[in-house]
Amino acid sequence: MSVMHVCSQLSQPDANGLQVCLEWVLINQSILPPLTLEEATMLGGGFWLVCVVAKSYRMLADFISSFR
């Protein structure tokens, strides 16, 4: 989760046209949208399935290359 500071209120411009922030607000922003337990389980299961399939293909390739 990332925390950002955002200016919510600026001052009136001074003689040089510069403004300063009068009030800062914290914004908590997550990378992922809120997930239900079912959605998180589905994403996690899909991730591990991809890992197992990739490992299986690697083992198969090593097995086949051992016959050369």
Image (cartoon, helix red, strand yellow):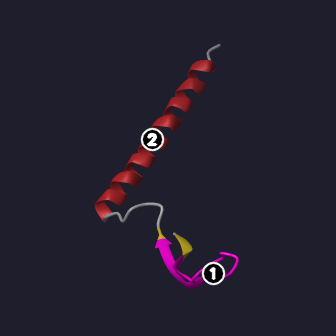
- Disc number placed over residue 52 in the picture, else none: none
**26 relative to 32 in the view: left or right:** right
Is 30 a magenta residue? no
Q: Is residue 30 above or below residue 6?
A: above
Picture coordinates of residue 51, whole percent (x, y): 49, 43
Q: Disc 2 marks which residue?
A: 50
Q: Which residues are magenta?
A: 7-28
Left or right: residue 15 versus residue 3 is: right
Q: Tell me residue 67's x, y (percent).
A: 61, 15
Whichever of labels 1 and 2 marks the residue nearer the N terminus, that label is 1
Residue flagged by tag 1: what amino acid is it? Val
For disc 1, the neighbor class at 10 Å (few under 14, some 14 to 19, many from 20) is: few
> Could you tell me which secondary element the residue under label 2 belongs to?
helix
Quadrant where the C terminus lies?
top right
Q: Which residue is mark 1?
A: 20
Residue at the spot x=51%, y=30% of the render?
57
